Amino acid sequence: MSDNPQSFNPDTTDLDRLHPAVKREKADVESGTEQAPMWVIFLGFIVAIIAGGQLGPNVGGFDFNVSNPFASSRFPDPRPVDGTAGAALDPLQMAMKKGAATYALCGGCHQGSGLGVPGAFPPLAGSDWVMGGTERNIRVVLHGLQGPIKINGADFAAPAPMPPQGAVLSDQDVANVLTYVRNNWGNKGSLVTKEMVAAVREKEKARTAPWTGPELEPYAKAEVAAEPAK
């Protein structure tokens, strides 16, 4: 028997030469299914862009209010939208919501619980200062507070000074945060308005120093006489 492998398959070499030739052949394309030339596709894009540019201004523009399918009286918009809903919200609830955000400036000292830090920052929860007169409350926030004070009859001998917030907060901000602390953690107080804050700010516009406990004693139960926000 011969040791030459081609003696068993004499056509092996011929098949190896034929395979690359077959691979180079393109498949037959059925008539009518040929791919469009690239220049035709490119021309179609150009025509579409030009046509869109002409139709836009001549048909009314690409405006949702013009092309909105619900614009017709036969198809009213089913979405219940009341643009006046915000104006009808309860003023106290609105002030509480906004005051909670402003209280972030106060929470670092008086804590989120309103209990403060013993010996450093007075409590706001259940405090007779908070539930006292609005005029004293507004003065404290606008100008700050320093020195010993009494809270619920007990001495608070060495509290950290409270910095003034009048230059940082607007009248509305002060009103919101005071309404918030006067109606949170079990406190139940009246609404403080921006008009009330503005009245105190105008009355004490020359003051630059923080208040002390004795200075604020005459205002412990004083309420600011100002028209509430409408």
Image (cartoon, rainbow, N blue to C red):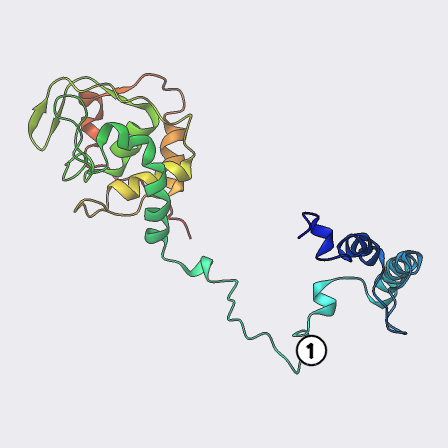
Residue beneath the point at 21% across and 19% down: 160
Residue beneath the point at 31% across and 21% down: 163
Q: Which residue is mark 1?
A: 72
**Residue 226 appearing in the image:** no
Please state the horizontal and vertical placement of residue 10, each as a whole percent of the image: 77, 56
Which of 34/83 is in front? 34
Please state the horizontal and vertical placement of residue 176, each as a whole percent of the image: 35, 42
Residue with the most extreme left position: 154
Label 1 neighbour load within 10 Å: few <14, some 14-19, many 20+: few
Please state the horizontal and vertical placement of residue 51, each as a whole percent of the image: 89, 63
Residue with the most extreme bottom position: 74
Which of 230/147 is in front? 147
Residue beneath the point at 15% across and 36% down: 127
**Residue 19 appearing in the image:** yes
Please state the horizontal and vertical placement of residue 153, each as a whole percent of the image: 6, 30
Name which quarter of the figure residue 216 lies in: top left
The number of discs equals: 1
Vertical placement of residue 53 versus 80, above or below: above
Which of 86/24 is in front? 24
Vertical placement of residue 102 versus 20, above or below: above
Residue beneath the point at 85% across and 59% down: 25
Instruction: Give left or right: position of 59 versus 72.
Output: right
Vertical placement of residue 10 versus 72, above or below: above
- Residue kind at label 1, given as amino acid type: Ser
Name which quarter of the figure residue 28 lies in: bottom right
Name which quarter of the figure residue 222 lies in: top left
Which of 159/3 is in front? 3
Q: SS at mark 1? A: loop
